[in-house]
Amino acid sequence: MGTNEGGLLDKQFQKAKQQAEQQKYQQMVQSVKPKQTWLKNAIAAFMVGGAITAFAQVIQNILQAVGLAQKEAGTTTLVIMIFLGAFFTGLGIYDNLGKFAGAGSIVPITGFANSIVSPALEYKREGFVYGVAAKMFTIAGPVLVYGFLISVIIGLIAFFFQ
């Protein structure tokens, strides 16, 4: 057996060994890899987001039944839902809901309240001014800036093209 044949066999052996190790590694990865739960996540988001908005609709219907006009009932409902989102975030309940429902808890207006209160609570140990007040709009700040900007642009378009 020549030196070329011995080297060739050694390379083939090394390649076969690497393939076996790679296959063993892939089997290990598949055994610890979490199962995809996109269907469960989508259902949870739909159910929780739907429940939040259905609850808001119930509040609005009650306010209208008590005698508020639709516009005032809608505004009052928004204020109540924002308060509840902030309140439940402060209690730590909304974060657990967000872990379960994902985007279903973020999409309604309560998610906006959560996005403002969460950073404030996270930085409360740094003091009121440098912690809570400074960090409150860390996440919600861009949303507010672009919301205000778009509302001004739409207002100007409506004013000039009336």
Image (cartoon, grey):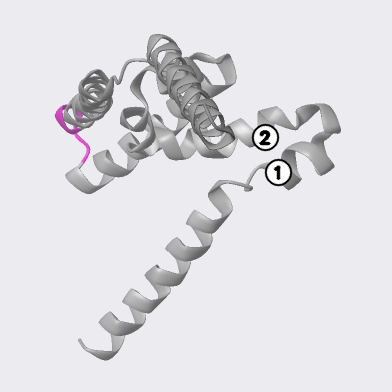
Q: Residue at x 37, y 38 (%)?
A: 109
Q: Residues within 10 Å of mark 1 (few under 14, many from 20)?
A: many
Q: Residue at x 22, y 38 (%)?
A: 68
Residue at the outermost front position: 1
Q: Is residue 130 above or below residue 9?
A: below
- In the drawing, what numbered circle is on residue 120? 2
Q: Residues within 10 Å of mark 2 (few under 14, many from 20)?
A: many
Q: Splitting the image into 4 quarters, where does residue 100 fall?
A: top left
Tell me the SS state at disc 2.
helix
Front residue of 113 and 142: 142
- Using residue 153 as the reference point, say whether residue 136 is left or right of it: right
**Amino acid type for the residue under numbered disc 2:** Ala
Magenta-colored span: 64-68
Magenta highlight on residue 143: no
- In the drawing, what numbered circle is on residue 1? none
The residue under label 1 is 135
Please name the predominant secondary structure of the magenta segment in the image.
helix
Front residue of 50 and 79: 50
Q: Quadrant of the C terminus?
A: bottom left
Residue at the outermost top position: 31
Residue at the outermost bottom position: 160
